[in-house]
Structure formats: structure tokens, C-alpha cells
Image: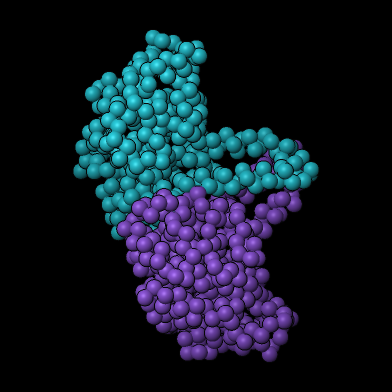
Chain colours: A purple, B cyan
């Protein structure tokens, strides 16, 4: 049984989207226990509108969420009962095994670093993200790959990159049931001699790692293709890559809308393509993939997208529970031991 | 009158594509003089098959091109009469004002750094690339923006980034007739506090620059949107970004092909969309944009894409001549003086 604490206050769609996702999940067949953290009155009101199984739910009171535009550090200092702090404290003291928040990414990372223990050998946590790819991955033919770090760090040493590779491999193993995920370093060329000093040194360490399926360097081209299951890079680069992918998705949608508005024949063409477009949309629908794990701590932390709808919240909680059940932290620990 | 030296041996499409592009250009109304560098017999044969104006053409003999897979340094050392070296020497000694090559990028950059003078104040050259965007740019509504550095450097100091901004602004001015291009630093957030130390320091210097229209930081999202005319970043990052854009283009093409093959209704839909797809293809056709300038030297150097067809070669030579006529080096020099 996994116990998941959910920050009910975070997320652009407001408390009702979070509660709706949680309520739905309690009615499904699973053994997930949920601790909702937020304004008790608001939570009670929202639950009143939703069918749910109260035996799977607890509520703990907190103040508001950290605003998306606020400085995380200043906001957490100014508001000690911010929902993410109360939720993270509950996780740290063992009231839950995993945490899910759709609130501010910076505040989630900062609260985790204040309250949680880092795994032995991990100098810095990493935020990982799943993104859609052309090639399929793992035994379930998942149409997505994992990339990390996408923003918990700025720059990374060789040792940081190696620990990102180990953590990414463990996470891909869990979400895609992939016993042997292919892992690569993102660089400016496939040769071992390409990249920054940190990348070149990490390359040599990973070549010798006994339990990581390291395939060498990949280039920018390989990201949308999805040549490997796990792409490893420093946080600054991962942030740019991830936002570019989001931007490309937006531009394609805009162009399709524009074509639809413009001419009768184009409109007809798009209609006839609709099943194909629907497949494409499913493939690029981030919401179904259950959020971004913050890796490197002794507890599971999943950052759901700020724009999460109820289904995305539900999926994020399911992913969190799966990571607990499969012992994500233990898998990462074993991978780290194999370097020594 | 601009005199352009063309490396006839470089390029995946072989000498005939280069000669065909050059031959066509000599028949158009312009005052461009061309010096073709390569195997004289091969060039003479190829010119025999093409209508051309011999009064606009000269030929100088050289050895072969540096192979795309070769190490540029080793290849240039082993082959002192490599076409790019002979062409670059002709440029350096004043036999031409600009150089165009579709050969190895690394060999072009290395040959330039061996033979050409860097502009005063430029510590390192940068390779710039035009790429398709959703938003339009400049008075001609160009559907592309400029990004640099995309691979002449790996990392960049604040001063390097500032000089990239100045060089990119001068180049955008010339190719898009844009008197006041909007320039931004690529970072992991729009705030001045975001990014590496080099980016933050460059941000402060550019804010005070009197003749650069600096709009601050942009994020990954802004690259496909095309929010600004010139995106500035270190070469490692620019390389990943550019290859990602190329990869996304390939994936979209693959998906369209796949849809075409699959179902009758989809096929019909694509056919009806054909005019829209043609517009999209024109928009994403790198070949029409005339290659990537290598900026920072006292002479104009344009690296045409390895897969250049005759039209791409012709456009690259036209862009090179335009950069000469508009005094690219002088514009960059004036921008650099404005920092002091």
C-alpha cells in the first residue's frame, strides 16, 4: 500500500481540479491512501461535489500555495504554512511515502531540499520529464522518452551527470517496465571526444558502469526521434530542450488552426486527417504521463504540470504509488553502489 | 562589385551541384565575380555541360575537399592543397572579398582561423544559422530568425556572448534589411537573474549597449515561436538547438509520410492540405536561406549546408555578395566600438 500526500492548493487549474482527480482515483481499484494538504474548508466543499471513497482519504490543514510567479525562497520564508511546506513535512516525518504537487516547481524543489534526505552519493537532485518521441520505448511500446535534469540544477559536474544517468535509468525501469533502458549523454556529437569536460569525463565513467545500458552520446536530432530511453544533460540545457519541445507543439497546433480557419479545402483535409491528428495529439499529450519526478531524495516526489487537469493529477498519483511499490529509492541506491 | 571565392569540391551533392549553382548565377543580372577553387579538369568538364557567362568566372586549381567524417585538423595538416585551404588563402590575400563552401564545417572554421584576421575585439568567431519560425521578422516579413553560436565554440564567456549579439545584429540587419533587429540571450527564464554567470553578466552589458536592440532573455519556447530576430547562446547549446529543430522537421515529415501510406481518407486529407503543406515546406526549407555565416573575421565566410543543391549554392553566393556590399565587417566593428 502506498501513501501519497497531495498538495491540494498548487496548480493553475485550482483546487477543484486536484480534488476531482483525487476523488476519481479513490473510486478505482487500488490500495492508494491519500493525504490531502490544503485549506480544510475549501477541500471539504470541493469533496462535497465529488463522489469519492472517504476511507481512502485524510485531510491536513495548510495555508495557501506559493504563487507561480513568486520567488520560491522568499515565499517559503514568508509563509511557513504554505501547502508545499506542510505537505513536504508530512512526507519527511513518515506520514506518507510519496508527494504530488502541481504547484511551483522551484518551491517544490526547495521544500524537498529543506525537508528530505538526499540519497547517499547524490550531490544534487534532478528533475526528470517524459516527452513524446517518434520511436517507441520498452516492452509496452511507450511513445515517450525521459530527459533529465530539466531544471533542478543549472550546471552539472561529471559525477552529477553520472548520478542523473543512474536515477533516470531506475525511473525509466519503473514507469516503462523497461528492465534495461538505453541511456545516453546529450552532446554536440556522438563521438566520446565531443562535449564539455564534464560530459567527456561522465562518458568514460558510464562506459564502465556494470548495470547501466550506456549507449554513448546523442545529439539534438535524437531528441525528437527518441533514439534512446533516457537522455542525460545539465539542467540549463534540459530546461531549454523541454521548453523548445513545448514550443514546437504549440506552433504545430497554431499552424493547424490557421489552416483550418483559412480555406475550405484545407478544412476538409484536416477533417479527413482527424484520426491521424488525434493519434498525434494523444502522442504529444503530456498530461497522460503523470508528471515529472524529482529524483535524488529518499522519498518519491512527483511534480505534476501546473496546467494539470483531473486526469493528469490522477495519473501523477498513480505514478507516485508505482514508484513507491517498486522501490525507486532502493533501485537508485543499488545503481550508485555499482560505480564504486 | 563583390568577388566571391567558391570551394567547388565541398558538399555532399558533389562538384556538379556547386558548378550548376554558380553557372546559373553568372547568367543572372548582378555584378558578382566568382573564383572557383577545385580540380581544374573536373571544373572544366562540369562547366562544359552548363550554360554560363565565362566573363564572370575564374578557376584556380586545388586538391580534394576535406571529407565530412575526417578530423579537420588532421585532414588540413595531411593535405596542404585541400580545396578549403586554397580557397581561404585566396580570400586572405585579397583575391576575393567573400568565401562560400558547402564542405566540412570544422575544416572551414579551422582554415578561417588559420588564414584570416579576427576583427579587433573579437576573441572567438561564431557560426550563425537561420531557422524557420512561426512569427515573421523585419520589413520583408521573413519567416526565419538567426541563432548563434551554433558550433564554432563550445562554451562562451560574457564577452563572447556580447560579441555574438553584436555580430548577429549586424548580420540580421544585412540579410533581412532589418535596421533594428531584436536580440535576446537564450536562458532558462526571462528574468535578468536567470542563467549561468556568463549569461547574467552579458545581460547587464547588453542592457547598456546603445546600438543593440536588446530585449532580455528568451526561453526554449521562444525559439520555434520566433519571438526575437536574433537568439544568442554558447556553441554547445546552439548546436543542440539547431539539430533538434532539424530532427523535429524530420519527424513531422515521417509522420506525414506514414499517414499518407496508411489510409485512403488520410491520404485524401493530405492531398487537400497540399497547398498548406507546400507553404510549410517552403517555410522550413533551409536551402533557400543561403547558408550559415561564420562571423568574427575581417572577411565574409558563408558555410552552405552540406546537402546544398544548386539553388542553395546560388543563394549562399548571393548572400555572401550582399554581406560584402553592405560592409558586414564594418557594421560589426562599429557595434563593438559602442561597448567601450
Quarter where residue A172 is shown: bottom right
> Between residues A277 and B57, which one lies in front from this camera angle?
B57
Q: Would you say A176 lies left or right of A219 here?
A: right
Residue at far right of view: B264
Return the x and y of residue B173 as percentages of the image width and height.
38, 33
Return the x and y of residue B186 as percentages of the image width and height.
40, 52
> Between residues B63 and B229, which one lies in front from this camera angle?
B63
At 55% from the left and 55% from the top, the residue drawn is A226
- Quadrant location of the N terminus of chain A? bottom right
Quarter where residue A26 is shown: bottom right
At 45% from the left and 20% from the top, the residue drawn is B19
> Between residues B282 and A13, which one lies in front from this camera angle?
B282
Return the x and y of residue A198 as percentages of the image width and height.
33, 61
State whether residue A266 is above or below residue A129: above
At 24% from the left and 35% from the top, the residue drawn is B114
State whether residue A141 is above or below residue B207: below
Amino acid at each position: 500500500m502506498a501513501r501519497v500526500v497531495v498538495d491540494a492548493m498548487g496548480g493553475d487549474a485550482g483546487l477543484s481540479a486536484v480534488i476531482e482527480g483525487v476523488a476519481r482515483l479513490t473510486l478505482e481499484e487500488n490500495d492508494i491512501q491519500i493525504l490531502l494538504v490544503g485549506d480544510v474548508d475549501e477541500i471539504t466543499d470541493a469533496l462535497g461535489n465529488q463522489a469519492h471513497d472517504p476511507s481512502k482519504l485524510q485531510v491536513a490543514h495548510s495555508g495557501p500555495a506559493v504563487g507561480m510567479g513568486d520567488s520560491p525562497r522568499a515565499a517559503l520564508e514568508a509563509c511557513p504554512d504554505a501547502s508545499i511546506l506542510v505537505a513536504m513535512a508530512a512526507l519527511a516525518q513518515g506520514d506518507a511515502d510519496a508527494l504530488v504537487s502541481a504547484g511551483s516547481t522551484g518551491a517544490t524543489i526547495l521544500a524537498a531540499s529543506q525537508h528530505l534526505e538526499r540519497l547517499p552519493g547524490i550531490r544534487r537532485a534532478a528533475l526528470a520529464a517524459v516527452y513524446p518521441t517518434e520511436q517507441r520505448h520498452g516492452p509496452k511500446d511507450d511513445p515517450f522518452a525521459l530527459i533529465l535534469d530539466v531544471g533542478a540544477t543549472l550546471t552539472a559536474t561529471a559525477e552529477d551527470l553520472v548520478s542523473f544517468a543512474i536515477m533516470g535509468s531506475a525511473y525509466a525501469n519503473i514507469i516503462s517496465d523497461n528492465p534495461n533502458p538505453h541511456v545516453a549523454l546529450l552532446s554536440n556529437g556522438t563521438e566520446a571526444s565531443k562535449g564539455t569536460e564534464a560530459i567527456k569525463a561522465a562518458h568514460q565513467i558510464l562506459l564502465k558502469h556494470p548495470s547501466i545500458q550506456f549507449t554513448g552520446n546523442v545529439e539534438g536530432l535524437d531528441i525528437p526521434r527518441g533514439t534512446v530511453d533516457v537522455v542525460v544533460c545539465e539542467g540549463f540545457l534540459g530546461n531549454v530542450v523541454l521548453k523548445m519541445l513545448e514550443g514546437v507543439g504549440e506552433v504545430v497546433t497554431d499552424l493547424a488552426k490557421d489552416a483550418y480557419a483559412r480555406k475550405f479545402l484545407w478544412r476538409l483535409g484536416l477533417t479527413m486527417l482527424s484520426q491521424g491528428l488525434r493519434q498525434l495529439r494523444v502522442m504529444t499529450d503530456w498530461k497522460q504521463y503523470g508528471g515529472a519526478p524529482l529524483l535524488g531524495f529518499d522519498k518519491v516526489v512527483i511534480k505534476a504540470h501546473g496546467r494539470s487537469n483531473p486526469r493528469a493529477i490522477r495519473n501523477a498519483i498513480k505514478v507516485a504509488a508505482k514508484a513507491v511499490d517498486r522501490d525507486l529509492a532502493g533501485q537508485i541506491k543499488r545503481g550508485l553502489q555499482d560505480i564504486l
